[in-house]
Image (spheres, rainbow, N blue to C red):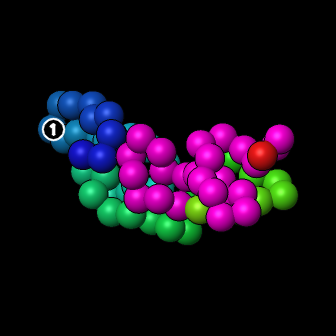
Amino acid sequence: MNGGTCYQGENSYLCMCPGIFDGENCETVNFTKQCTLDCSPGQCVATGDARFPYLCSCDGTLYPNSCKGK
């Protein structure tokens, strides 16, 4: 779920969740997870989207990687 990758074990499974997603099946949004983008001088924002869990807010416009040169 939400772009997670799950691995089947002998009697259970484990899901590796991307970005801000947590939970047994990556079903929970965890806005306290750390942003990995360098958005300086802008601000990193959590989106809740599995493809782009974080975006940089640069003077009110959202960019996928950084605010440098924006």
Res 66 → quadrant = top right
Crowd around label 1: few <14 · some 14–19 · many ≥20 (10 Å): few
Task: Tell which residue pokes out farthest to the left in this image.
Answer: 11
Q: Position of residue 46 (x, y in %)?
A: 53, 61
Q: Is residue 49 left or right of residue 60?
A: left
Asked if 62 appears above or below 32 in the picture, the reply is: above
Q: Is residue 52 left or right of residue 28?
A: right
Q: Position of residue 27 (x, y in %)?
A: 27, 57
Q: Is residue 38 left or right of residue 47?
A: right
Residue 67 in view: yes
Res 43 → quadrant = bottom right
- Residue annotated with mark 1: 11
Instruction: Please name the amino acid that badge 1 sits on.
Output: Asn
**What kind of secondary structure does the magenta stretch mostly adopt?**
loop
Identified at 32% across, 58% down, the residue is: 23
Identified at 25% across, 51% down, the residue is: 25
Residue 35 in view: no
Q: Which residues are magenta?
A: 46-69
Q: Position of residue 30 (x, y in %)?
A: 45, 65
